[in-house]
Image: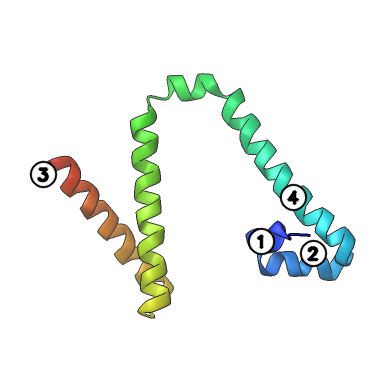
Amino acid sequence: MFDLASVVFGDFQDSIVATFGDSLGWVVGHALIIGTVTLLWFTWTGRDHIRTKSGWDNSTLLDMATVTALTLAQYAVYTGTLGYPIGASLGVAFAGSMFLRWCVNVLN
């Protein structure tokens, strides 16, 4: 069987398996994934009034997701390929993402 929990949780899933054993650890790990996805789903669908009244529309959420994705992609390159420290990688990646966002919004 495919062990999605090991892919998602990594070493934490290994700790769960060490605590509960192979079979029950697999069940607990996948129950955590299902529970988290269910919680996020109910939070997202049940709080429609917060989304509509907060002033954040789809373009704001897309902008936040884009900045986060760009920051994470740059962070992976800076730490994995270039070997920068974690703090410096996050700072440089976030600054680069915000600069790119500024270029697109202001210079476009």
x then y, percent, for residue 31: 78, 48
**Residue designated by label 1:** 9
**What kind of residue is marked 4?**
Leu
**Residue placed most toward the observer, 61 or 4:** 4
Tell me: residue 90, above or below residue 45. below
At x 69%, y 57%, the residue is 4
Task: Give me the C-alpha separation between circle 3 and circle 2.
Answer: 50 Å
Disc 2 marks a residue whose amino acid type is Ile
Q: Residue furthest bottom?
A: 83
Residue position for label 4: 32
Residue drawn at point x = 32 percent, y = 62 percent: 93
Residue contact at pointers 1 and 3, CB within 8 angstroms: no
Q: Residue at x 33, y 32 (%)?
A: 59
Q: Give the crowd class for mark 4: few <14, some 14-19, many >=20 residues within 10 Å.
A: some
The circle drawn on residue 16 is 2
Name the residue located 47 percent from the left edge and 25 percent from the top edge. 51
Residue 91's quadrant in the figure?
bottom left
- Asked if marks 4 and 1 touch (Cβ < 8 Å), the reply is yes
Q: Residues within 10 Å of mark 2 (few under 14, many from 20)?
A: many
Q: Are marks 1 and 2 in contact (CB under 8 Å)?
A: yes
Among numbered discs 1 and 2, the one appearing first in the sequence? 1
The Cα–Cα distance between marks 2 and 4, rounded to whole angstroms, is: 11 Å
| Figure check: 13 above or below 67 | below
In the foreground, 26 or 43: 26
Q: Secondary structure at mark 3?
A: helix
* Kind of residue sitting beneath label 1: Phe
